[in-house]
């Protein structure tokens, strides 16, 4: 809730949601959030399937060699889901579509790693260093900063990384 309208809430831990100055001041500013129109991430378990990140061009072989500036991060909203409109309101206020264009380098790195470190290579790493890696998942975690679905909220760019890697898991280089 904005400090200008609710000065006492500015000191409440329940009103503090980590956001950088750009998001909090430039985008949100004095907009008064409404529980019927917006999602509060502390009070609601957000369905991580309300939207997914992907990339353009969506063909892996076309995208893998591109420079980050030539890629586009895409948010695919699932409008049939219950809280879609509330999530879309949050994303519009914070210009999430625009902000994530600054992270095409992350997508580019994931694409390149997926291309170079194929399943055969990952198995070689796992078996060459048996004391370091007990599973292919641990190799993935090192290479891609792979995270489990339940870890998405606790990782930097977790949802983006999770969605792109999940999308690629069905793609063979």
Image (cartoon, grey):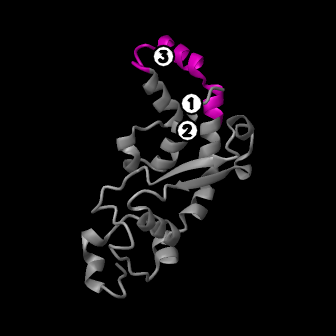
Give the camera-side residue of 102 and 95: 95
**57 inside magenta stretch:** no
Residue identifier under label 3: 126
Residue at image point 43% right, 64% down: 87
Q: Which residues are magenta?
A: 112-135
Q: Earlier in the sequence, mark 3 or mark 1?
A: 3
Q: Position of residue 30 (x, y in %)?
A: 43, 83
From what the image shows, is residue 149 above or below residue 33?
A: above
From what the image shows, is residue 164 above or below residue 85?
A: above
Q: Position of residue 9 (x, y in %)?
A: 27, 79
Numbered label attached to residue 167: 2
Q: Earlier in the sequence, mark 3 or mark 2?
A: 3
Numbered label attached to residue 43: none
Q: Position of residue 149 (x, y in %)?
A: 39, 41
Q: CA distance from mark 2 to mark 1?
A: 6 Å
Mark 2 vs 1: CB contact within 8 A: yes
Q: Residues within 10 Å of mark 3 (few under 14, many from 20)?
A: some
Residue at image point 68% right, 36% down: 60
Q: Position of residue 54 (x, y in %)?
A: 59, 47
Residue 111 visible to the viewer: yes
């Amino acid at each position: 809730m904005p400090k200008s309208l609710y000065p006492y809430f500015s000191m409440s831990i329940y009103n503090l949601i980590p956001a950088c100055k750009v998001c909090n001041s430039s985008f949100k500013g004095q907009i008064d959030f409404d529980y019927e129109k917006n999602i509060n991430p502390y009070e609601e378990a957000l369905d991580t399937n309300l939207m997914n990140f992907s990339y353009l061009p969506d063909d892996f072989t076309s995208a893998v060699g591109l420079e980050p500036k030539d890629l586009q991060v895409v948010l695919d909203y699932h409008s049939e889901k219950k809280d879609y409109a509330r999530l879309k309101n949050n994303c519009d206020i914070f210009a999430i579509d625009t902000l994530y264009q600054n992270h095409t380098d992350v997508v580019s790195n994931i694409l390149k790693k997926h291309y170079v470190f194929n399943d055969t290579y990952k198995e070689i790493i796992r078996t060459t260093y048996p004391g370091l890696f007990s599973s292919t998942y641990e190799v993935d975690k090192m290479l891609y900063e792979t995270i489990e679905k339940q870890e998405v909220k606790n990782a930097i760019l977790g949802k983006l990384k999770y969605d792109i890697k999940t999308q690629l898991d069905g793609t063979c280089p």
